[in-house]
Structure formats: structure tokens, C-alpha cells
Image (cartoon, rainbow, N blue to C red):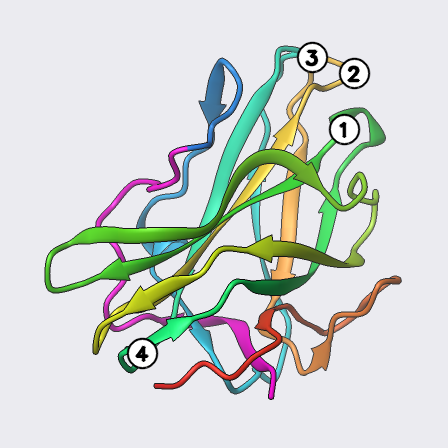
Amino acid sequence: MPTTFYLRDLTAANPPSAGEKSTALPSVTLGANNATGTDETRSLDTAKGTAQTSLAKNSDASTAARANYLGRFTSAGLAAQTIAAATWTIAIALAEANTNANSFLNLSVYIWRPSTQAVVGFIYDSGTDIGVEWGATEDGQVITFSGSAITTVLNDVLVVEIWRKATQGMAAAYAQTFYFEGATNVVDTTTADAASYLQNQNTITF
């Protein structure tokens, strides 16, 4: 049975230490607008929220390639298990303030071990754009990707980092926004009240 982790505006019990953990991102010369504070400590939860919220950050006023770390979400403690190699789904509502922003989604998904404060391994970690360019208004994207197998011990946590990558068409600062915490599962069309989620096609136990 699929396991769905909703991106929630709640504080995670055991988030990773500050700073992105991806080894593939930023995949261009410069990363910018790095997430800090509560942007890094939100939770992944099997229950969805009740009302949409959003996280927005301005891009650099530059036409050079950028990879922007926008936010991070962490699950509750997992049971000891082997998470098989499988197809995962990210369903997320996104927006760029101007079509010259040329924004695309990048992801890093990994297992973090709170007891050692270290990444156990990456399920998915790539600087390759996934999905299509973000819309100029809130728009849902449902994207699948191939995740590697990984073995957890008791109380390891699942983490997803949300990244935006772009080479802008104009040197202007544009707002980059993603939406979550809503009550309506994101679909691959215009979305309101977005319950953005990460899903594995198999059962993951807690």
C-alpha cells in the first residue's frame, strides 16, 4: 500500500542540522537564497493539513545559473526496515512571479540518522530538472522519479529538500513560491488549497 507524506507547516521532532545535505545540489556555479530557521524544520506527516500556506523566496537579479535551496521537510521516526528501490511521486504546487524566472524543480530525498547526526544515504539526489517550468500562477505538478533502496534503523527519519534551479531570462529578482499544508491533494493542473505530498508506492513503517 502506498505511503504518503504530506508537506506540513509543523515543526519536525528530529530535523537534520542546519544547511542542505545534498551532494548533487547546487549543481551549478552558485546556490542562493538558502533556507534557514523554520524553512528547514518543517515536517512530513501522513495526515494532511487544513488550509494552504506557502513559502516564497526571491531569486537573484541575475541571468547566471542558480540553484536555490527553498525548504526542507522531515518525517517522524521510522521503524527498522529496508525501503526498496521504487518509483516515488512528488506532487507539489509551484509558482514563479514572472515567466522570465525559468524555474524548475530539483529534489534531494534521503534518510537522516538523528543519533549520529549524519545522512545514512540518498534515495534521490539530483541536479536534473524534473517536471515542467513553474507557472506564473499557482499550478500543481505531479512528478515521478526513481528512488534507490536504503536500509533504516529505528528512529531514522525521511527528509526531502525542495530546490529551484533556473537560468533567468532577465536580471531581475522574482518571487519563487511553493504551496503546502492544504486539504486538497495536488493534481497535475491548477491547484488550490494545495496538500503537497511525497509518496512511495510501497508501505513504509513507523
Name the residue rendered at 80%, 32% in the picture.
98
Sequence-first disc among 4 and 1: 4
Sequence-first disc among 1 and 3: 1
Q: In the rendered structure, which segment of residues is drawn in magenta?
A: 1-23
Sequence-first disc among 2 and 4: 4
In this figure, which residue is indicated by the disc labeled 4? 78
Count of numbered circles on the image: 4
For label 4, the SS is: loop
For label 1, the SS is: loop
In this figure, which residue is indicated by the disc labeled 2? 169
In this figure, which residue is indicated by the disc labeled 1? 102
- Most extreme residue toward the left is 116
Name the residue rendered at 84%, 63% in the picture.
188
Residue type indicated by callout 3? Ala
Mark 2 to mark 1 CA distance (whole Å) = 7 Å
Residue type indicated by callout 4? Leu
User: As displayed, is residue 127 above or below residue 170?
Assistant: below
Disc nearest the viewer among 3 and 2: 2
Sequence-first disc among 2 and 1: 1
In this figure, which residue is indicated by the disc labeled 3? 171
Image quadrant in which you'd find residue 129: top right
Name the residue rendered at 52%, 33% in the picture.
68
Mark 4 to mark 1 CA distance (whole Å) = 37 Å
Give how far across and how far down residue 142 sits, in percent: 76, 61
